[in-house]
Image: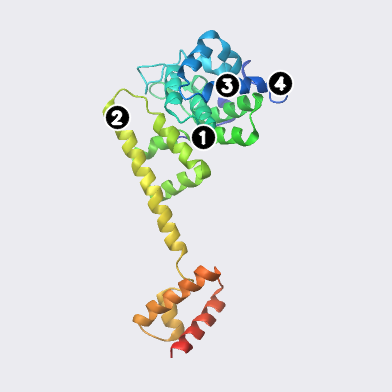
Amino acid sequence: MSGNDAPDTLHQASPSDPPVDGGVDRSAGERLTAILIEDDCVPGLWASIDSGEMDHLVPELSALRMEQDPIHRHKDVLSHTVAVVAKTDAEISVRLAALFHDIAKPRTRSFDHGGVTFRHHEAVGARMTRKRLTALGYPEGLVEDVAELVRLSGRFKGYAEGWSDAAVRRYARDAGPLLGRLNHLIRCDCTTRNKARAAGIQIQMDDLEARIAELAEQARRDAERPGMDGEAIMDHLGIGPGREVGEALAYLLAVKRTEGELDRSELEGRLDAWWADRT
């Protein structure tokens, strides 16, 4: 699982950074959007890159051309990035996230850990994404969505090592309303030519999505439990196990569904009235 809180020292300012304040170029943002929302955006992307236009729109992108990623050995990071963008749905937040998801690899490259690594590149990339998209005049909400997708884009890498239910819940909770788009981005981030590996990643994502759905359903069922359990009902009414306990639980659940959460004294009063009517 990727680190979420990379130290600020990992991100050194460069001349290509957009200005922190001022200098907003909305026409450049509009042009980038026009390129990305084409159903087949690959020809337009490469034309913009090869002509030098992209150096004005997203100057950080050109640094990816020479960056070799050990995971994607058959292509440089720029080619991988374009391939990922091409696989995504033509929706601007996902397309932008795909374009920026590896943007910080040149800045975070290290040979200090037994081979080339890009530690914290998602966290650094999220900051770079936020700055660049802000300078391009994108709306704040879209900027934050795309930056968050970039930040979370590496989380899934640890799933094959085994996630607890708590880790699955945390992944879904952190993604929030972006969950569907994040999962789609992760699926599209697989551009390997190894068919078995590609299929394995999709199977893992299928498994994660199934677990998220199961845990959500379990949470929904748990939330529907009445405010008193069977033991509490028996203690309060002075009865033993039997059909009446199940009927009392069903009654209290019906109360909860119609009236929401009630405090314990109110529940006990309702239970007493229900029991008196029965007897």
Identify which residue is drawn at 44% across, 88% down.
278
- Which residue is farthest bottom? 279
Name the residue carrying label 1.
149
Point out which mark residue 197 bears. Answer: 2
Q: Earlier in the sequence, mark 3 or mark 2?
A: 3
Res 1 seen here: no
Q: Earlier in the sequence, mark 4 or mark 2?
A: 4
Q: Disc 1 marks which amino acid?
A: Leu
Kindly report which numbered mark, 3 or 4, lies closer to the viewer in this rendering: 3
- Measure the alpha-carbon separation of dots 3 and 2: 32 Å
Around disc 3, counting alpha carbons within 10 Å, would you say few (fewer than 14), some (14 to 19), or many (20 or more)?
A: many
- Measure the alpha-carbon separation of dots 1 and 2: 23 Å
Name the residue carrying label 3.
32
Name the residue carrying label 4.
23
Specify the quadrant that holds the C terminus: bottom left
Q: Earlier in the sequence, mark 4 or mark 1?
A: 4
Res 229 seen here: yes
- Which residue is farthest right? 22
